[in-house]
Image: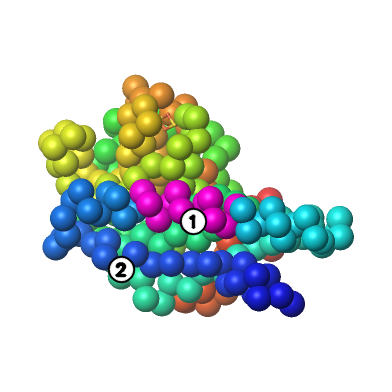
Amino acid sequence: MSANKKASDKGRAAVDSSISQDGMDLKRRRLLVGGMSVAGGLGAGALGVSMLASMSPSARAKAAGAPVEADISKLSPGQLLTVEWRGKPVWIVKRTPEALASLSSVADQLSDPDSKEEQQPAYAQNESRAIKPEVLVVIGICTHLGCSPTYRPDIAASDLGSDWEGGFFCPCHGSKFDYAGRVYSGVPAPTNLEIPPYMYLDDNRILIGEDQGAAA
Ligand code: FES
């Protein structure tokens, strides 16, 4: 197994430990979160192309869809971890009690609060859109035109309104998503963010891209 393959299997996870509910300059936080998402996607994408080109067709297919493992043991409430899966950024967010409480209070502002559109496996078709309510696993790609939204846990942010309770904002065309990746009404994005198939290997390890048929 090559070093690149090992690195890929470990999910190339990176915790932005500086993301928290408090104590950090907002502008710097936006840059860090946005940069992390974009840099992760581009770098890993280029790596993936060169790796795949040297493989046999069967190995290529397997690598392109291989599940990735994420270690969430060091993820604190309010933090976001980005893992790359199939060339896409997958966000893992440890939601705070306040973030979880916001899910019901913003429901009447959402386009699909009950997640009726097929944007998640069956086990994530609930209010938190997750297996465990405190941990969100979601693909960080806007459902409008594919930008990567930014993580915006800053309550009542001046650019998002006094009723902003935290979530994700796509600055490309102004789409807003709540803490479960559910899209707000009246924005360009047509659907909620997509939840990938995933499963827990144990309390601290999540396998993304594999759920052993649980989604069926
Ligand atoms: S790509 Fe996100 S709002 Fe257009």
Looking at numbered disc 2 in the image, what kind of residue is underneath it?
Ser
Graded by Cα atoms within 10 Å as few (under 14), some (14 to 19) or many (20 or more), the crowding at tag 2 reads few
Looking at numbered disc 1 in the image, what kind of residue is underneath it?
Gly
Mark 2, residue position: 17
Q: Provide the secondary structure element on which disc 1 rests.
A: helix
Q: In the image, what residue occupies the spot 54% across and 40% down?
A: 119
Mark 1 to mark 2 CA distance (whole Å): 16 Å
Residue 37 among those drawn in magenta: yes
Can you give x and y, in whole percent of width and height, for residue 112 in the image? Answer: 43, 32
**In the shown orientation, is residue 21 left or right of residue 195?**
left
Q: Quadrant of ligand 1?
A: top left
**In the shown orientation, is residue 169 left or right of residue 27?**
right
Q: Earlier in the sequence, mark 1 or mark 2?
A: 2
Q: Which residues are magenta?
A: 34-45
Q: Provide the secondary structure element on which disc 2 rests.
A: loop
Q: Is residue 213 visible?
A: no
